[in-house]
Amino acid sequence: MVIQTIQQIPESTPQGNTPQGIIPQADTVEEREDCKICFQIADGVHFGVASCRACAAFFRRTVIMKLKYMCKDKGNCTVEKSLRNLCRSCRYTRCLNEGMKIELVQLQRDSIGKKKSVGNTSVDLLFTPNVASSLSAVFKKDKEESLTPECAILSQMSCGYDFFLKFRKSTNTLVQSTVITPTFRIPKIELHASRFDSAKQVSKVEAHLVTDIVNTYFSPFNVLKFKDKVALFKNFFCYFSHTDRAYQSYKQFENDNVNDKILMPDGGFIKRTELGRFYENAEGVHTSAEDAAQIFQPVFNYILDVIVDYMRRIHIIEIEYLAILGFCLWDDAVPGLSKEAKSLAVRTQSQILAELQSYYASKSKDPTQIVQRVGELLLLVPKLTKCVIMLRENSVLAELFNYYEADVCCKNFKEDASVDLDCTAECIVHSKNE
């Protein structure tokens, strides 16, 4: 299987902290070396080799996740700043040949619960094994229903989604600078009120996490050409980001018919009647909290009154939710897709439908019940589409009147946005490799 990179997760090394395997360097630019992997300016010695943060993050993630790559060009691909994302296999080989040491990618000791300042936390901690393992006992996935062997795509998506939830939880821990934030799958625990700044931080990391999850677990996305990946993902992320908030809100408050809260990616919630509090004293918000809330109040009400309410009425389960995500991802009507990508999208949609049918049949559903249930699920899609349109329109208005500063990553997820290379991250919408 050929795996083509679509992004790099950013690293953030706060002043005063030295991440694992990194030797501090002088502050003067004159003393900096070039990255031995991609030849851009290095910022230190990572895992024994002078390298940039992006290449160090790539090496760490490859080792920790035990990823395997295959080169399309017999191991002869060029690896440099503008091309380093084209072939992961050759990039990893270069890391090893230049002397990066696997043994330096080790556990980050006592990484949870010690740091009290947001400024002294590092996104680097997200990708150390002990974080995932320490969270696994708390966030172990409750399989609502077992999947049949025929559900290959949905089963793989389920694994990826579980992985995503665990790592998003660790993101919340770092941003909040507290012990594990009690949200999502933990019932009967008091939640905290979400704030614009922390939600924005987590959303930025979330975008990069989702690119890896989609490319690794949402088969057959990884076989697409890079340009097709960009087109599909830019369309999909808008759906995923807000649909997942609705789904997690439904799961958390499933039995509360008068719930007025939406869970946010930072692990907190926003209350319908207190939306203004979300924007209070927030960095990057240039208007009053009440004015900012007024713009987004209609779509907030729509998510609660229409989407969450519909999920509750049909009692959607996780495999069905993942199927909906699959339909949103494999949209053959996305502009700019190649003929091959459109054909693959149509085939994948059909495969997901077939897997749903197989799943329902394994639960002794008769054909009439299967048709009825699939119809109920598909009726959710246009509701999600309307929500995405409303959010995009509201975001445009907020930016037009300079109500808040949109995140660079979020700007690039707009359908008509040009690729912005001014982000410190290298994600799917920031690459030159189209």
Image: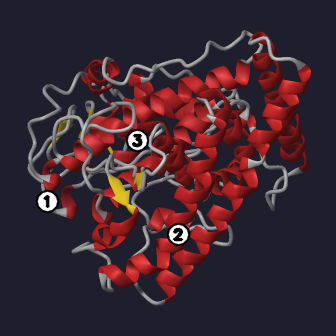
Q: Look at the picture and state if 304 lies above or below 376.
A: below
x and y, in percent, of residue 150 in the image: 77, 13
With 62 as the anchor, is 375 left or right in this view? right
Q: Which mark is residue 66?
A: none
In the image, is 132 to the left or to the right of 339?
left
Identify the residue position indicated by label 1 in the image: 27
Which residue has dot 3 on it?
55
Q: Amino acid at mark 3?
A: Cys
Q: CA distance from mark 3 to mark 2?
A: 25 Å
Residue 84 in sight in this render: no
Would you place residue 422 above or below residue 330 in this image? below
SS of the residue at dot 1?
Answer: loop
- Is tag 3's residue or tag 2's residue first in the polypeptide sequence? 3
Residue 113 lies, with reference to residue 331, above or below; the image says above
Measure the alpha-carbon separation of dots 1 and 3: 20 Å
Camera-side residue: 306 or 10?
306
